[in-house]
Image (spheres, rainbow, N blue to C red):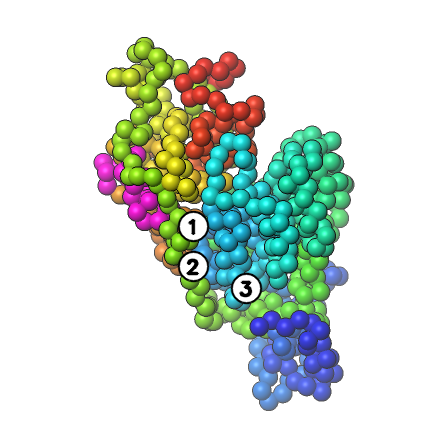
Amino acid sequence: MRKKIYEVSQYLSKVARGEEKAELVLTNGTVVNVFTGEFLENTDVAVVEGRIAYVGNAQHTIGEKTKVMEANGRYVVPGFIDGHMHVESTMLSVTEFAKAGLAKGTTSIFMDPHEIANVFGAEGVRLMHEEGQQLPLKVFTTFPSCVPATTDFEDAGASLSVEDIKAGMQWENVAGLGEVMNFPGVVYGDPLMSGEIAETVKANKTVTGHFPADDPKMLQAYIASGVDSCHETVTKEHGLEKLRLGMHLMIREGSAWQDVKEVIKVITEDHVRTDNISLVTDDVYPQTLVDKGHLNHVVRRAIEEGVDPVTAIQMGTINVARYYKMDQDIGSITPGKMADILLIENLEQVEPTTVIADGEVIYENGQLVKEFPTFVYPEHIRHSIHLKSALTAADFQLKSKGSKTETTVNAIKVIENSARTEKITTTLNVENGIIQPDQEKDILQLACIERHHQTGQISLGFAHGFQLKKGAVASTVAHDSHNLLVMGTNPEDMAFAANELAKIGGGMIVVENQKVLAQVRMPIAGLMSDQPLETVVEEVKQLEAAWTTLGCPIHAPFMTFSLIALPVIPEVRISNRGLVNVEAFEMIETEIISEGSAKI
């Protein structure tokens, strides 16, 4: 049990004076001071009751029972803090992510469990939050704000109200409101958005933002509402604009959205003060955790782009703690702070050799050295795929409204490594009254099936850009409402993929000739695996290879596919209700020609 500073302050004082002895002393390290930007060489750090008691020559704190750890000149760095991330994007449970994150030097996260909230509402948020509270990783929660993302175009599994937010703000270690994506609602006074922000501010907690638009009037209205950060900045100019307006700038480097190279120029070219800038991951896939790391990778990327190493470390530690008003507890190697400490050989590589959390060694010599508790999700959380009935090939055949042998349809064109899509139109053959996909044109059949309430609702459309030559794919990770997405070259494989995915409790699957080529089982809400990182990484590798076997050449296609149902990002999406023209804010028919669309 972590103790509050007021519970142990007198004992810390006694250790600092030498009247009591420390439990752990790191000796002869080079402390990175995030307040002054200095390297304090030949410095000791004394720890007791999970907190730092003394920084300096700490020989007077060493007793017979004190564990002494020789730093041998290694850099002594505060544990990294990720100020905005979605654990669900790692495909791992909170516990399994904690193992991976701690091994890379992340000792605290501020998670937004937005995805599970769309499936199970406040109950899902509570379960992930509770799982996080029993771990050596400090898990703070920003309570999801936009659930569902929209009520106009799709059906989620749950919704959150102002009362849910008000109640959630009273949970211990809930740090604020999750990214407020509905910025038009904020600006124009939507009662739900205004109410959520008001309850967060009343609780003296932080309102985190999401503002990808260009309109400066909208931006200032958004900030004036009480939202004071953004992780959706992709240009230096927008970063500078937000900083000038007092917004906390979160610079993101995840697996797909890699913004450091451009946005970091506010520091390397414009030379702004960095106090109000932090580094975040947002969405990280399991392979990235293994190959590149977690927040240490983002810090490394900032250094690679020319940022001073200490400044980069500040943006991954103390700046985050200050933003969330938690710098009394985390973010620095100073007396009274929680003893979250990294030993690092090389500041450019940012790979910790030792990770200490709450004064306890968690990772050393290339392996975790602490047992992690088990968290068991209730059975209904592990059985979240509710279809009205088993699907058949006929469910994936779109009937033409006309009587001609060809027709023109709207289709969704995906863009590699981008969350955006384009609306296109194309002419397709009609056989026996059924509109046919066209592999030569790279037009695949697409379906979105409501999977929360057993309504039996299925919408059909077409996708361009994946280049599948055979088989089918399916996913219950389908932002943001996470209905069942299916895409393929033939209805038989599409039905087989959907039914198999339902049988295993959700996840992602690739099939050919009604045989499973690869799958990632995600029984926790259809969003997260219950397996260890190594298993998930291997399953994702097989999944990627299977997509390639079907003919898809694009990077991380399963992630691009999972975003094709997100009806809050332009230009066109598919939901369980049908096609959504996001820019026009309206539902559109599949078999209708819209003027002004690109044609193929």
Quadrant of res 357: bottom right
Q: Position of residue 108 (x, y in %)?
A: 59, 60
Mark 1 / mark 3, whichever is N-terminal:
3
Q: Which residue is mark 1?
A: 525
Residue 377 numbered tag: 2
Q: Which residue is at the front of the view, 1 or 391?
A: 391
Q: Which type of secondary structure does the marked residue at label 3 adopt?
A: helix
Q: Which residue corresponds to the image point at 53% horizontal and 31% vertical from the top-left?
A: 152
Q: Position of residue 93 (x, y in %)?
A: 45, 56
Quadrant of res 190: top right
Q: Amino acid at mark 2?
A: Tyr
Q: Position of residue 229 (x, y in %)?
A: 68, 45
Q: Which residues are magenta?
A: 494-515
Residues at discs 3 and 2 in contact (Cβ within 8 Å): no
Crowd band around label 3 with a 10 angstrom C-alpha radius: few (<14), some (14–19), many (20+): some
Q: Which residue is mark 3?
A: 133
